[in-house]
Amino acid sequence: MFYSDKNDERLRLGDVVRGFACGKLLIEQPFTDGLPSTYRVEVCHCLAVVLSPCCAIRDGYIQLAPLQQIEPKWYRNERWLGDLTVVNAPMDPEEASPPQQWQMMSSSEQAELKGRGKAYTLLDYFVYAPHVFLGKYELGWQKKRYTQGHYVVDFRGIVCVNCPKIGLPDIPIKTKVLQLSKETRGLLRDKMAYYYGNPPEEDKP
């Protein structure tokens, strides 16, 4: 089960919420010469996902990222199309590669990848399963139209929101749309931990 049958009366990691604004700052270049560069702020009021640890949602602070439609290029891997949430957990290298790409590899390349075992793919993203509260949308890929119900949260888009109302007891009831099941929340926590904790090659022992 991807979502919980009922919502707790508090905000938790992975919750889908409404009523919060998420912003993105875009600049032309860093302000290295002391003069401000051209910049703009984009603000959206779409559904968002709570990415603060449950115990860190306090003092009016919460971390959020907007819930977005998937990108059409995901349709390159037809292995995922039945259930895109498979990218939330480590997978076999054959499953992570589009069928044509896998078939073009030599047997030695395939063996090398298989030898590494299961690994995360699309590391920046966590996919949310379809739900009637999220709605459906259409995507075009290779001259075909697809009806899609999966959504995605991008760890690179996390913003901090300061709102003194967050600590009030009625806020979760008013803002929470969906709550992840315990198992799905564990998958989100594990992937985020790997995302932040995976060291680059030069830092590995």
Image: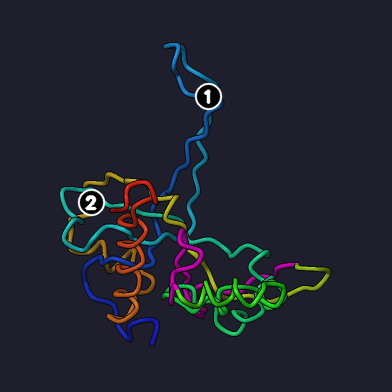
Classify mark 1: helix, strand or loop.
Answer: loop
Magenta residues (range): 116-140
Q: Position of residue 7 (x, y in %)?
A: 28, 77
Q: CA distance from mark 2 to mark 1?
A: 35 Å
Q: Position of residue 113 (x, y in %)?
A: 52, 72
Which residue position holds label 2? 165
Left/right placement of residue 135 relative to residue 55 reads right
Left/right placement of residue 42 relative to residue 58 reads right
For this orientation, the residue located farthest to the front is 108
Q: Quadrant of residue 104?
A: bottom right
Residue drawn at 57 percent across, 79 percent down: 94
**Residue 68 within the magenta-colored segment of the rendering:** no
Mark 2 crowdedness (10 Å alpha carbons): few <14, some 14-19, many ≥20: few
Q: Nearer the viewer, residue 162 or 2?
A: 2
Q: Position of residue 127 (x, y in %)?
A: 48, 70
Left/right placement of residue 164 relative to residue 176 reads left
Magenta stretch secondary structure, dominant: loop
What amino acid is found at the position of numbered circle 1 in the picture?
Gln
Image quarter hosting the N terminus: bottom left
Which residue position holds label 1? 29
Front label number (2 vs 1):
1
